[in-house]
Amino acid sequence: MRVAAIYDIHGNLPALEAVLDDSRREGVDRIVVGGDVFPGPLARESLECLLGLEVPVSFIHGNGDRAVRERMAGIEAVNLPEPVREVVRWHAEQLDRGQQELLAGWPASLRLTIDGLGETLFCHATPRNDTEIFTRLTDEDRLRPVFAGVSAPLVVCGHTHMQFDRAVGTTRVVNAGSVGMPFGRPGAFWLLLGPDVELRRTSYDLAAAAERIRSASYPGAREFAERHVLHPPSEEDILERYASAELR
């Protein structure tokens, strides 16, 4: 079995479509969506695209998906900055009850056995929750307690939008990067799993994608196109920013 792990789409439908085209050419047998389809400018359309695929698709939730689901249930995410709460509220108004129930059914993690890799644990941020931050630079001693109870030899995560492949003790930990909101080079980042781990980057027409995103009614659509499609922040800047927030 070959698996495409696609994380942190954030409503960037053009990037998602490009990755799905790549995954078809690779002949993947299954797709794992590792959280944070939401929020984003074309998130509902991205969800509909994923639900219409012929290949089996498994979802786990990210912190963004959870915030939208909770807002639909009347729970305000007071720990989020106001601009983020605004887009969460916008999504909650766009989705119907069936879509709310769909999001509510997404688990926090998933286990699959993949040819050549064995048992693989998929989670959004860490095995403990969907918000913890760590990077390729995080000291291994700080990470050992996070992965101490994990029996799977391979853990796939996302959340920080930057790919890496590292070891924590005897556990191989791989970050899929972000399909829709990468940090570093523009493009759509994902993983091809089986029989080994391949960190993939898919190129797509950034100018056309930005124009498509700008036309969305999503709050901040123009800013999203500029900052997350055309000119993503550098990895160095994000690593510096995350250094003060990791594992809190």
Image (cartoon, rainbow, N blue to C red):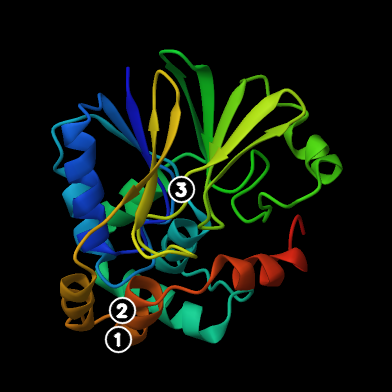
Residue where numbered disc 1 is placed:
222
Query: What kind of residue is marked 2?
Result: Ala
Task: Give the image location of residue 22, x and y in percent.
Answer: 21, 41
Judged from the image, the secondary structure of the residue bearing numbered disc 3 is loop
Residue 126: image location, x then y, percent:
64, 44
143 above or below 100?
above
Q: Image point 66% across, 52% down: which residue?
A: 135
In the picture, the disc for residue 225 is 2
Q: Which mark is residue 61?
A: 3
Within 10 Å of disc 1 (Cα), the crowding (few <14, some 14-19, many 20+) is: some
- Give me the C-alpha separation between circle 2 and circle 3: 24 Å
For this view, does 23 lie left or right of residue 116?
Answer: left
The residue at 68%/42% (across/down) is 128
Residue 11, position in %: x, y? 30, 64
Residue plotted at (33% across, 76% down): 230
Q: Earlier in the sequence, mark 2 or mark 3?
A: 3
Residue 77 seen in the current view = yes
CB under 8 Å between callouts 2 and 1? Answer: yes
Q: Is residue 219 visible?
A: no
Tag 1: amino acid:
Arg
How far apart in space, not on screen, are marks 1 and 3 (Cα)?
Answer: 26 Å
In space, the residues marked 2 and 1 are separated at their CA atoms by 5 Å
Residue 110 higher or lower than 248, as above or below = above
Residue 113 position within the rendered picture, expressed as x and y whole percent measured from the top left: 45, 16
Q: Nearer the viewer, mark 2 or mark 3?
A: 2
Which mark is first along the chain, 3 or 1?
Answer: 3
- For the residue pair 99 and 15, the one nearer the viewer reads as 15
Q: What's the residue type where badge 3 is placed?
A: His
